Amino acid sequence: MPSLKVEITGFSEILKKLTDLEGNVRKVTEKALEESYEIVTKKAEDAMTPPYLPAQGKYSTGQTLGALKRDQAVIWQGDTAYIHVGFDLRDGGLVSLFLMYGTPRMAPDKALYNAFYSAKTKKEVTAAQENVFFDAIRRLEE
């Protein structure tokens, strides 16, 4: 299952600034990951609408969309935080892999693949994360 992490150029300097201003690094990190999660999950939901599915969704039962992970929590392991995104493969989400990567008889669903892996999505996620951290620093500096 894919996970999101915070990837910002100069992140150590941002963390130092936030710490020097006595900001809650853990809380800000969690907010950044949650906003990233919302971006990717919304894109995945949009990609699962019938116009984007093979045969315009003619064979869709909604089971795969129902397996999309919602309301995920940030998980901490020491100083590392992440949040799971994507589909629960054990609960009807296995089809998402065939949709994203295609089969010998079906072309890949680019909209679904791009929801997780496109450069555009990565840019949006990075921008959202930067905004969360910079907003926190600005509020503390006031």
Image (cartoon, rainbow, N blue to C red):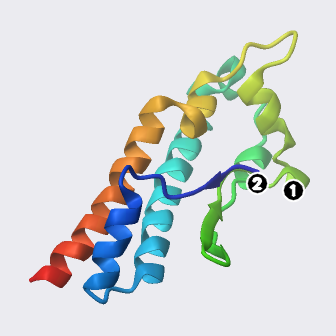
Could you tell me residue 30's position as x and y percent? Answer: 49, 74
Horizontal side of residue 122 vs 137, given as left or right:
right
Mark 2–mark 1 Cα distance, whole angstroms, equals 6 Å
For the C terminus, give its image quadrant.
Answer: bottom left
Instruction: Confirm whether residue 23 shows in the render.
Output: yes
Rendered residue at 40%/76% (across/down): 28
The residue carrying mark 1 is: 91
Q: Identify residue for label 2.
A: 67
Q: Are marks 2 and 1 in contact (CB under 8 Å)?
A: yes
Q: How many marks?
A: 2
The image quadrant of residue 120 is: top left
Mark yes or no: residue 49 visible: no
Name the residue: 81% across, 47% down.
93
Give the percent coordinates (x, y) of residue 34: 49, 67
Q: Nearer the viewer, residue 45 or 84?
A: 84
Q: Amino acid at mark 2?
A: Ala
Count residues near mark 1 (Cα–Cα under 10 Å), then give few for <14, some for 14-19, many for 20+: few
Residue that protrudes farthest toward the bottom in the picture: 22
